[in-house]
Image (cartoon, rainbow, N blue to C red):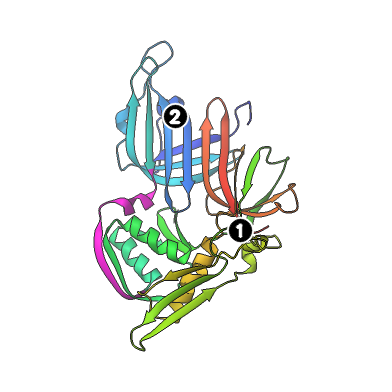
Amino acid sequence: MPSVQTGGFRILKNRSALPTSVIAAIQSVRVEDEINIPTMFSFTLNIVSSGGAWQDVNLDIFKPGDEITVFLGLDSLQQMVSAQITAIEPHFSDYSTATIRGFDRMYWLKFGTRTRTYLNLDDNEIVSQVARAAGLTVKLPGSPAMVNDYVLQNNSSDYDFLMGRCAQLNYELLMDGATLVFRPSAEGGSPVKTMNYPTDISDLRLSLKLPTMGKQVTVKGYDVASNKVLTAVASSGSSQDKMGGKETGYQLAQAFPDSDIQLERPDLSTPEALQAIANAQYKRNLNQFIEGSTSVLGDPDMVAGVNVKLSGLSQRFNGIYYITSSVHSYDVSEGYQTEFKLRRTGV
């Protein structure tokens, strides 16, 4: 970690700059993002000087619902999140502080519970209906192959309901500004940059664990019209699953017993739907093959949902990794730092 201040920040409230007195009182800024979880921001202000006198900081300029845009960077600043204030947390003591925090608009999906039915719709159409009902615009870069005869949202929040749709298709939710994005997992795609050990990364922890479930996934459904059991099987993925390596976690586990699994889905009645579920579960079960974490000098490109290529390790561990979460923090004494977690499905 750097021992001198590096980088900087900018914070807008309702798209306007904060008062100079407030900016001067900010001691730290933090943005946390993770796949399928609302991105959170926070910043902490010193509201009492070291001599005990009140700083010229009016906390009442902040209120729940205010739009906050946070920028962080080194040579230039980059937008990290557009969100809304959900909490104001003053702490009155000898050195009084106040923390302002909130979430991006994915958080809107967590309000209340709903009971709805969706008939003969694919998941893009279902997500569109849910997003519109929650007041969100939506972007749908994927093309789900399955049309659902009947889907029930049973007294659950929109967020929990959509997490279930993501899990069965290996899709993910994220925000692009104020727009909700529902897309296939981007794991194994083109990396945004290459980082070398030890030049760019000096401290990297990795853990390789053989997958024990899912080398072959069999999904069984039932076709009421023909009175027949339908079966779909997934036992191989794409070259993308190797993530720049030579084999997947399943292939590395050849010396161990087969890890085949079977799923019963009597609610699915088409071969296309069953195959989509089988393919998605085959990939999801690889997600914990290699996991790791690291910290670097502040880098706004290292966010959840992008791939990065690591080099300078061993031949087995060099390759593409998927960033699953990141924490971007700025502190007046330490500057801008980034921590992130990553995973890999191949070697």
Which quadrant is home to the C terminus? bottom right
Label 1: which secondary element: loop
Q: Is residue 226 visible?
A: yes
Residue pictured at 37% horizontal, 21% vertical: 56
Q: With respect to residue 214, does 316 lie above or below?
A: above
Q: Give x and y (percent) for residue 145.
A: 46, 75
The disc at residue 23 is: 2
* In-image side of 186 versus 66 (left or right): right
Residue 345 - label: 1
Mark earlier in primary sequence (2, 1): 2
Residue 10 locus on image (x, y percent): 48, 37
| Amino acid tagged 1 | Thr
Region rendered in magenta: 103-121
The amino acid pointed to by label 2 is Ile
**Residue at image x 55%, y 69%?**
216
Residue closest to the eye, 304 or 262: 262
Residue 104 painted magenta = yes
